[in-house]
Image: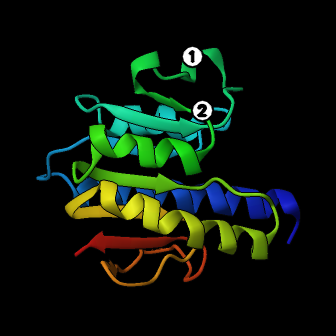
Amino acid sequence: MSRLDSFIRRLEAQRAVLNHAAELIAGLDGPILELGLGNGRTYDHLRELFPGRDIYVCERRVAAHPDCIPPGHLLLLGDMFETLPAARERLGGRVALAHFDAGTGDAAGNLRLAARLRPLILPLLREGAVLATQQAMDGPGLAALPLPEGVPEGRYYLYRRA
C-alpha cells in the first residue's frame, strides 16, 4: 500500500471514529479536548460535530491554517506534559471527549508518548467520557469500546471513562 493510500485510510478511520464518538457522547455535557492541532483539519471537523461546545486544544506551537486556530482562551499552548496538569483546575473531570492523534512518526515512540500522557488525560475526563486515540491506552479507568464498522482493529482506539 502506498503512503498516500495509508494516509487516506487513516483519515477515513479518524473521521468515522470521531463521528461515532459524537453519537456516543450526545447526551453527555462537557467540553471537547483536542490533543494536537497540527494543521487544524481535525479541529475544524470537531467544530462541525460540536457547534455548541467549547473545544480546548493542546498544541506545542500553532502552525495551523488561519481558519482553524482556536480562540486564545481555548488554546493550551506549550508542551502537553506541562499544559495538561495545568488544565486540571479548569477542565478536571469535565471533558466529554478527548481526541489524541499527536505523534512522532515512530511507532515505538508514539506508544511511549501515549503511555506517558495517559495519566495526564485521565483526570480531565468526566465519567462516561470517550477517548479517541491512534495509540492504545489500555489500563485502569478506561474500558475499550468497539470501533465503527469499516475501521480495522489497531488503526484507531476508542475508550469510555469508567
Above or below residue 104? Residue 155 is: below
- State the SS at label 1: helix
**Picture quarter with the C terminus:** bottom left
Name the residue beneath numbered marker 2.
40
Badge 1: how crowded within 10 Å, few (<14), some, or many (20+)?
few
Residue 66 visible to the viewer: yes
Residue toward you, 27 or 95: 95
Give the mark, 2 or 1, whose residue is nearer the N terminus: 2
> Which part of the image, by quadrant, shows the N terminus?
bottom right
Q: Which picture quadrant has residue 12?
A: bottom right
The image position of residue 107, as x and y in percent, is 77, 73
Q: Are marks 2 and 1 in contact (CB under 8 Å)?
A: yes
| Three-letter amino acid code at the position of disc 2 | Gly
Q: Quadrant of residue 31?
A: top left
State whether residue 75 is above or below residue 34. above
Report the front residue among 126 and 123.
123
Amino acid bearing label 1: Asp
Place of residue 118 in the rendered image (x, y in percent of width and height, measured from the top left)? 48, 67
Left or right for 13, reference 39: left
Horizontally, residue 2 falls left or right of residue 49, namely right
Residue placed under numbered mark 1 in the picture: 67
Q: Nearer the viewer, residue 27 or 16?
A: 27
Task: Give me the residue at 59% from left, 80% from top.
Answer: 154
